[in-house]
Amino acid sequence: MDHGPRRLGAAAEWLVALAFLLATFVVAALIIGEMRAVRTPGPAATPATTPPPGPSPDAGRDRISVPSLLLLDGKQIRVGDSLEQVTAALGAASQAGTDTVGRSPLGDRITRSYEHAGTRFVLVFEPFERNGPPRVTAIYLR
């Protein structure tokens, strides 16, 4: 019997299996290298701008964030309303205190306190697009 072609076929199968095994080790080494690269700490990232002012750090204790506010006189304020809409709905007399203005990536961020119809709340205005009109981004009840 001639075992020549069978041995050559078996040797080729072993070579292919060895190539796949080596490729598996190479891929595993690349994955482990990427995982190590992600976990290595780099220099601390410093923000390009100072963080904009917002509610106090203890806001969770004395304020509640809501997506919309229905006031006792039937007026409603929602996240996304423009500063002009809020001023028209509430009037300038409802504003309590002074504005806090800071910078955000898209423009000025305004934090303003209100008292209207017996309800005290804080609105945060910020543009949704570059150079856009300020809109309500957060509503906090006191």
Image (cartoon, helix red, strand yellow):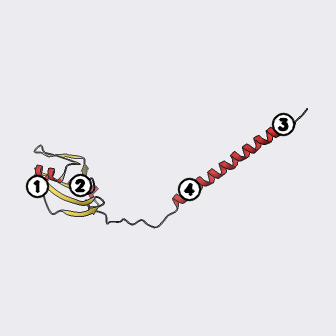
> Badge 4: few (under 14), some or many (20 or more) residues near its Cα, within 10 Å?
few
Q: Residue at x 12, y 43 (%)?
A: 74
Which residue bears the numbered disc 3?
5
Which residue bears the numbered disc 2?
132
Type of residue at label 3? Pro
Which residue bears the numbered disc 4?
34
Type of residue at label 4? Glu
Residue 73 horizontal/vertical position (percent): 10, 45
- How far apart in space, not on screen, are marks 1 and 2 (Cα)? 24 Å
Marks 4, 3: nearer the viewer: 3
Mark 2 or 4 closer to N-term? 4
Q: Quadrant of the N terminus?
A: top right
Type of residue at label 2? Gly
- How far apart in space, not on screen, are marks 2 and 4 (Cα)? 40 Å
Describe residue 77's horizontal placement relative to residue 16 as left or right: left
42 over 22 or under it: above or below: below
- How far apart in space, not on screen, are marks 4 and 3 (Cα)? 44 Å
- How far apart in space, not on screen, are marks 1 and 4 (Cα)? 56 Å
Marks 1, 2: nearer the viewer: 2
- Between 33 and 23, the one lying in front of the other is 23
Mark 1 or 4 closer to N-term? 4
Q: Residue furthest top?
A: 1
**SS at circle 3:** helix
C-beta proximity under 8 Å, tags 1 and 4:
no
> Badge 2: few (under 14), some or many (20 or more) residues near its Cα, within 10 Å?
few
Type of residue at label 1? Ser
